[in-house]
Amino acid sequence: MKLDNRLNAMTVDVEDYFQVSAFEGVIDKKDWDSVSLRVGDNTHRLLDLFAENDVKSTFFTLGWVAKRCPDVIKRIVDEGHELASHGLAHQRATTMSRDEFRADVSQSKAILEDIGGVAIKGYRAPSFSVNDDNTWVYDVIKELGFVYSSSTYPIEHDLYGVPHWPRFKYEREEGIIEIPIPTVRKNNVNTGIGGGGYFRLYPYWLSRKRITRFMAEESAPYSFYFHPWEIDANQPRFDNAPWKSKFRHYVNLSRMEGKLVALLKDFRWGTMQQAYDIS
């Protein structure tokens, strides 16, 4: 029995363990092809879990990954999931000029559409890297043919966050729908409940409690995000990374798959387009 009959959005940011922003200073992009690639097998495992639990998801996928794992892209599409863009090579939007950003996202969209054979409507900026200083991002993705973005997290965080921005789906003046990562409010402060490291860190009962509270208080759908590397406890380790980065990345990896399965069973899940009625 589901805890709530509302359709929510399951999302996966398809990137490998060595591509996360936390390890930018540890491994150079030019060395990525020399590192063990694990994202393909991990994403296939997620697709198996989704099939077992009758779940559809949106896969925000790096163009870099799509070129090296075309079988994953084709399976995502063939099994009725939504394919969306996470940029080309996980470069944060805040580190690019407008022209660099356009080239990055345009290449990603072209790669995904060529391999997947479907129109790409959704975009998610790496590390939620859209803020007051680069709202031109929305003009660019509108010009490139995207319909919606899920690129903002309205919380205080040392790496990202726009706490004063809207908490729920809205249409921006540029003509793009923005769907922020979910939060709950307490004492006039937004707390992140969207997934990722928070979900791995906290016991499952606490995450479930926060999600059900969100559903009780808000009429909007809930959306959850995570990454294929989060179910991979045996991934290679970067011992030379800063301690905070290592903690955030490695905490409770061995428990993630079990928590994820519980989440899939407790709530109803669909794609971003399904849950938020985007055409």
Image (cartoon, rainbow, N blue to C red):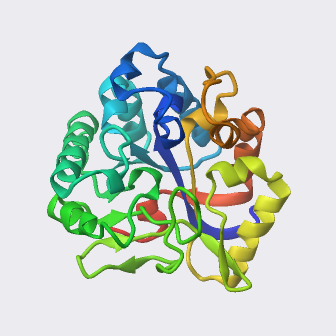
Q: Position of residue 215 (x, y in %)?
A: 68, 75
Give the percent coordinates (x, y) of residue 264. 68, 50
Left or right side of 118 for 33: right
Q: Answer with left or right where residue 205 lies relative to residue 76.
A: right
Q: Is residue 250 above or below residue 216?
A: above
> In which quadrant is the N terminus drawn?
bottom right
For the question of whether residue 1 can be seen, the reply is no
For the image, the number of numbered tags is: 0
- Up the image or down, 261 lies above or below 188; here it is above
Q: Quadrant of the C terminus?
A: bottom left
Name the residue: 29% across, 27% down: 67
What residue is at 72 percent from the left and 80 percent from the top?
216
Residue at 20% in and 36% down: 114
**Residue 172 image position (x, y, % from top left):** 31, 79
Q: Position of residue 126 (x, y in %)?
A: 42, 50
Q: Is residue 160 above or below residue 243?
A: below
Question: In which image quadrant can residue 10 be found?
Answer: bottom right
Q: Is residue 111 visible?
A: yes
- Residue nearest the viewer, comparing 152 with 52: 152
